[in-house]
Amino acid sequence: MSETLLIHGGSVVTPTEVRRADVLVVDGVIAAVGEGLEAPDGTRRLDATGCWVGPGLVDLHTHLREPGGEEAETVESGARAAMCGGYTAVVAMPNTTPSTDCAAVVAQVITLGRATSIDVMPSGAITVGREGTHLAPMAEMAALGVTIFTDDGMGVQDAGLMRRAMEYGRGLGVTLAEHCEDESLAAGGCMNEGALSSSLGLVGRPGIAEEAMVARDLLLAERTGCSLHLLHLSTARSIELLTEARARGVVVTAEVAPHHLTLTEDLCATYDTVYKVHPPLRGADDAAALRLALSDGHLDAVATDHAPHPPQAKDRPFDDAAPGMVGLETALALTIEALGGEAADPRAVFRVLSRTPAAIARLRASDERIGGFSAQGGDLAPGEDANLCVVDVSARPVVDPHRLHSRSKNTPYAGRTLLAGVRHTVARGIAIVIDGEAQR
Ligand SMILES: [Zn+2]
């Protein structure tokens, strides 16, 4: 299984510097990093000339749909899309059928994940069936290695229940992740609420639906001391609330999705349901505020919210279509775009796509990992598990939905020229993507 790899000619991206160096991988771990490394006979050589060599990407927010939604995606097809996008680990969302709300389903997803080439860590539901009424057995899921609990797809609407979940989660040492939308404000809406939704005759989901739950959960996290992660923030006001709470010492992290950084609500004027997503695409001011918050570190991570849907779920009137977009195969380039394009700092790119998400999911080498997951988000130092992403920053691929590896093709970026491509992905010391082609 294991092979010896020499990734040569690239620029290695550590947390503190970017320098020309080769990387030698032996038996699944980084054996050496340096210029002009010699490699033993039989070594597979991967050309990284002109590329960034960094830790494999880690997605905190992937909908793999299995069990129950295999027409849209499977763990296997989603993992293939992930590795082609440069990911070596993903956190699978629990809105499956049945939902991932107990040890049996968690174990099923872990087993399915082990048959893929990357690490698939399930998240667990906060409430039974994600129905928002009774707490799920979080302890038995945490015992299998689950570190993130969420009812994603929906937020936990009942504040008292969320408080109890946080009190319970604090004791378990896990993180609660919230899809922030108050349904009493958002229900029935299908795009951002504002002048545009009125003129299009579509019911809106207002920014305040998100902000009200962000504010509530920040207060609950402050009171309970539970670690909180805010999923896919989409408004400038949410960032302000986050920043204020963090200044008070609240233990909170937050992610942003590539589509909220790079797309705006005016695309909904086409009535093309590929642009429908929850929380919805906002205005240009919000998108600009999110890009600024990502650059200055107020937003911790970029997470895809990869949400595959089969055609029949999208080929419907806008207000009736399923919300969500695929994202695993475009997130890297869009993050580079959001961080300044050709001027983007590679250290920032790997911070928001790998190192910080790995820390949030507790997949770093320094974390006590249960469930057989390898160490992610490394510093590119000898002795680390070899999970690596080699980015060709001179590639300019054009998004073709039919060439995506995901089982679903609902990307809003069809025809867009991307500012980078994944040349190689190495997971657990195995080259699983070489020259942009999946090897397995
Ligand atoms: Zn969500």
Image (cartoon, rainbow, N blue to C red):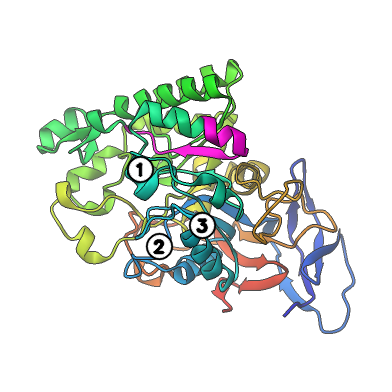
Q: Quadrant of the C terminus?
A: bottom right
C-alpha separation, residue under disc 2 versus residue under disc 3? 38 Å
Q: Callout 3 environment at 10 Å: few (<14), some (14 to 19), or many (20+)?
A: some
- Residue 393 in percent (x, y) is at 60, 56
Label 3 belongs to which residue? 103
Query: Mark 3 or mark 1: which comes first in sequence?
Result: 3
- The relative height of residue 323 versus residue 399 in the rendered view (above or below) is above
Residue 307 quadrant: bottom left
Query: Start and end of the magenta stretch?
Result: 167-181
Q: Amino acid at mark 3?
A: Ala
Residue 370 quadrant: bottom right
Query: Mark 2 or mark 3: which comes first in sequence?
Result: 3
Q: Does the rendering let one see residue 299?
A: no
Label 2 belongs to which residue? 399
Residue 253 quadrant: top right
- The relative height of residue 315 versus residue 289 in the rendered view (above or below) is below
Q: Callout 2 environment at 10 Å: few (<14), some (14 to 19), or many (20+)?
A: some
- The relative height of residue 327 versus residue 252 in the rendered view (above or below) is below
- The residue that appears at 34% across and 30% down in the rendered structure is 158
Q: Is residue 174 magenta?
A: yes
- The residue that appears at 78% across and 54% down in the rendered structure is 380
Q: Quadrant of the N terminus?
A: bottom right
Label 1 belongs to which residue? 263
Front residue (pair 250, 168):
168
